[in-house]
């Protein structure tokens, strides 16, 4: 019995819809996972995140090991109690954030040493330490410790990096042990090289995981190159287990990834862009700070039922952003996360109803209408 039963209820082409059952609740797939980097989805109360329809959120090994510390969170009862979120949490394994945030980094076969971006303190992260930190946090879905090569990279560099990640995947599996009720996901690497992606998928399958992530994408390759990889990469992974595409993405990235067989995604975009005044709607993006909204009494999105759209005008949202009021980021983050979850619910329903192609056609047509 897998530690996390994944039941696929319906398929439409390569797309699937189903349920990933965890001891802290069910995850409806395809799923979008909001990012709660430092034990909070920024500008949101956890109850509000749940109200948007999120079944699971993400935490970050890198940030939490630096502040407040994994042992401290463990002493305080674990990450769920600490941040008042009792549904599933997936934590990233830390290597990706080290390479993108830390300084004075040194990468060896054993792991990575780095200086904290917060206070410059020195740290050493290995597959074994990453598994221990994610255990201390109480994460429901643990990510293997991997290395995501920065672009541009030659095929040789991508191959060497992927093979290191596969050795780290084995060490992650060995260190994770057999923790029932908790899942360990492997992470496929290999850049945009099909042979390397096939080698990585084969290595992960032979180690054996509870789910499989597609890493090494959404790192600047562009949507066309990402979709070219997604045209074959999900199919290299076990058909009956969850597929998680890391760090994706804009609404049209998500739709294209779901069409190609991805079950889970995460991205800081809806929350981060919400704090800067960027609203995502069915008609496309609205920058609420634009002067044209100053006297507009209409809601941001007439069809949206979120608090920002049902209780406030564009003029108000424009004002509080221009005035730098805290409520501005709260309202637009809430709207964006609500919109993302509505999109996921629409995709799940369309797949269940064997009408995904129609859903996607309407999705793109709406964005062409403009005048938002
Ligand atoms: N694009 C991208 C994004 C992330 C961060 S996903 C995330 N962590 C915390 C929030 N969200 C990745 N993480 C890992 N471990 N490996 C990757 O290849 C990778 C690629
Ligand atoms: Zn709204």
Image (cartoon, helix red, strand yellow):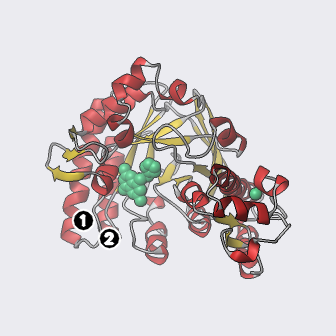
The front one of 40 and 165 is 40
Residue 47 location (% of width, % of height): 68, 35
The front one of 295 and 257 is 295
Residue 337 location (% of width, % of height): 65, 53
The front one of 122 and 205 is 122
Element carrying mark 1: helix
User: Badges 2 and 1: C-beta atoms under 8 Å apart?
Assistant: yes
Q: Residue at x 78, y 58 (%)?
A: 353
Q: Quadrant of residue 175?
A: top left
Mark 2 or 1, nearer chain start: 1
Q: Residue at x 46, y 29 (%)?
A: 182
Q: Is residue 207 visible?
A: yes
Task: Indicate whether 43 appears above or below 136.
Answer: below
Element carrying mark 2: loop
Q: Residue at x 75, y 61 (%)?
A: 354
Residue 322 location (% of width, % of height): 65, 64
Q: Quadrant of residue 124?
A: top left
- Other residues around mark 1 within 10 Å, as few (<14) / some (14–19) / many (≥20): many
Task: Indicate whether 366 appears above or below 17.
Answer: below
Residue indicated by mark 2: 193
């Amino acid at each position: 019995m897998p530690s996390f039963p994944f039941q696929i209820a319906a398929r439409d082409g390569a797309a699937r819809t189903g349920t990933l059952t965890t001891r802290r609740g069910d995850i409806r797939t395809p799923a979008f996972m909001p990012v709660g980097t430092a034990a909070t989805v920024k500008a949101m109360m956890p109850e509000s995140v749940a109200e948007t329809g999120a079944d699971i959120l993400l935490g970050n090994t890198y940030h939490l090991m630096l502040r407040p510390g994994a042992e401290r969170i463990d002493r305080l009862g674990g990450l769920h109690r600490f941040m008042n979120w009792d549904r599933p949490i997936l934590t990233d394994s830390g290597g990706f954030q080290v390479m993108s945030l830390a300084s004075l980094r040194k990468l060896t076969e054993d792991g990575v040493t780095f200086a904290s971006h917060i206070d410059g303190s020195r740290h050493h992260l290995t597959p074994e330490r990453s598994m221990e930190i994610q255990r201390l946090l109480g994460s429901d879905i643990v990510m293997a410790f991997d290395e995501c090569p920065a672009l541009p990279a030659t095929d040789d560099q991508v191959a060497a990096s992927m093979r290191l990640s596969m050795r780290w995947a084995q060490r992650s599996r060995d260190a994770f042990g057999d923790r029932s009720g908790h899942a360990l996901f492997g992470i496929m690497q290999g850049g945009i090289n099909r042979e390397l992606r096939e080698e990585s998928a084969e290595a992960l399958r032979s180690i054996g995981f509870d789910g499989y992530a597609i890493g090494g994408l959404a790192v600047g390759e562009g949507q066309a190159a990402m979709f070219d990889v997604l045209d074959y990469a999900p199919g290299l992974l076990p058909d009956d287990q969850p597929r998680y595409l890391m760090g994706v993405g804009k609404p049209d990235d998500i739709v294209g990834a779901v069409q190609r067989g991805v079950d889970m995604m995460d991205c800081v975009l809806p929350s981060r862009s919400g704090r800067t005044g960027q609203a995502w709607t069915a008609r496309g993006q609205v920058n609420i700070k634009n002067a044209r909204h100053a006297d507009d009494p209409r809601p941001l999105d007439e069809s949206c039922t979120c608090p920002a759209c049902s209780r406030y005008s564009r003029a108000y949202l424009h004002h509080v952003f221009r005035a730098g009021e805290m409520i501005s980021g709260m309202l637009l983050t809430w709207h964006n996360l609500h919109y993302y979850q509505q999109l996921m619910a629409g995709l799940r329903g369309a797949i269940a109803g064997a009408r995904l192609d129609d859903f996607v056609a309407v999705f793109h047509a709406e964005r062409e209408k403009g005048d938002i």
